[in-house]
Amino acid sequence: MKRYRYILDPSSKKYKCPSCEKFSFVVFIDTETTEIMENYGRCDRETKCAFFYHPTKDGFQNCKYSEVMDSHFYEVSPSFHKNDLVELSMSNHNNFLKYLKFLFGSSIANSVQKKYKIGTLCEFNNGTIFWQIDERKKVRAGKVIQYFETGKRTKNITWMHQFLRTKNEISDFNLSQCLYGLHLTQNDKTSIIALVESEKTACIMSVIFPGFLWLSCGAKGEFKLKKLEPIKHRKIIAYPDCEIQKNGSTTYQEWKRKADGFNATGFDIYVSDLLEKEVADEQKNEGIDISDFFMKKLYKKI
Ligand SMILES: [Zn+2]
């Protein structure tokens, strides 16, 4: 079957039609980003309205509506790492774990490592492995980042599937990421989920503010529907990094705009403006996250 980048939402979700204003509008989805394209779609009132607005000019005029409605055919089935790889990787030490120990002491550092499944890739200069394990305990990815002992990251990043491929231990791997810490949602079904950008921030905040369940989406651009889908039924507070981007907008504005769209489909996400309000302008230019903010306030250790 031919694949299309933009498809009409195969779920039964309906939006307000821009033409007839009835809730009969099926929106397009960008299958590359899995984002909802609110302004584009087709009104289901075929005889009375039939408003149709396509995301591209030339579009997929030959795409049959029924074909798209059939299934989530755009989903590629994900590959998984072996679970024992995670346990094996946790027997070694790395700079990020050293940093956690420096901040909180051995006992807390060890429990954070066990909880969040932090491994070490010795062959990558003892890089820190952040295992992405989903709600079914399937290991979807291992992101490897090298840190200095100060807790600052280097630019050196790799992925476990890339590393294993260079060693010829695996051939094909369909990377289908999940939120970092998603496996924890099975044991804790009630806490408010606090969502941050980086894995490091989630780990540190889990100690500073244990009342929330801290998860990370991995990067500011990874705050997206597909990753959030497994926690759709949960109450979520998102804490974007405080950062002004090249185009002058802030990550807060970007996440807020996206969250408004997600909330229209049934999510319950509040994007916190705490940092926007509290952080001084010079810190905003450096880019500061919620753990930097609290560490400065509470521990004065950075
Ligand atoms: Zn309509």
Image: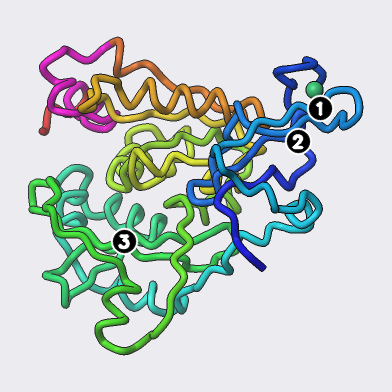
Magenta residues? 278-297
- Ligand 1, image quadrant it occupies: top right
x and y, in percent, of residue 120 in the image:
24, 69
Q: How many neighbours does mark 2 have within 10 angstroms: few (below 14), some (14-19), or many (20 or more)?
A: some
Q: CA distance from mark 1 to mark 2?
A: 9 Å
| Mark 3–mark 2 CB contact (< 8 Å) | no
| Whether residue 208 is situated above or below residue 71 in the rendered picture | above
Which label belongs to residue 24? 1
| Whether residue 57 is situated above or below residue 106 in the rendered picture | above
Q: Residue furthest bottom?
A: 168
Assign a secondary structure to mark 3: strand
Question: Image check: 291 left or right of 111?
Answer: left
Question: Of the residues shown, which amino acid type is indicated by label 2?
Answer: Lys
Q: State whether label 1 is within 8 Å of ligand 1.
A: yes
Q: Mark 2 highlights which residue? A: 13
Residue placed at 49% from the left, 51% from the top? Answer: 32
In terms of sequence position, does the residue under pointer 3 or pointer 2 come before the other? 2
x and y, in percent, of residue 233 in the image:
67, 38
Assign a secondary structure to mark 2: loop
Name the quadrant of the N terminus: bottom right
Assign a secondary structure to mark 1: strand
Q: Quadrant of residue 47?
A: top right
In terms of sequence position, does the residue under pointer 1 or pointer 3 come before the other? 1
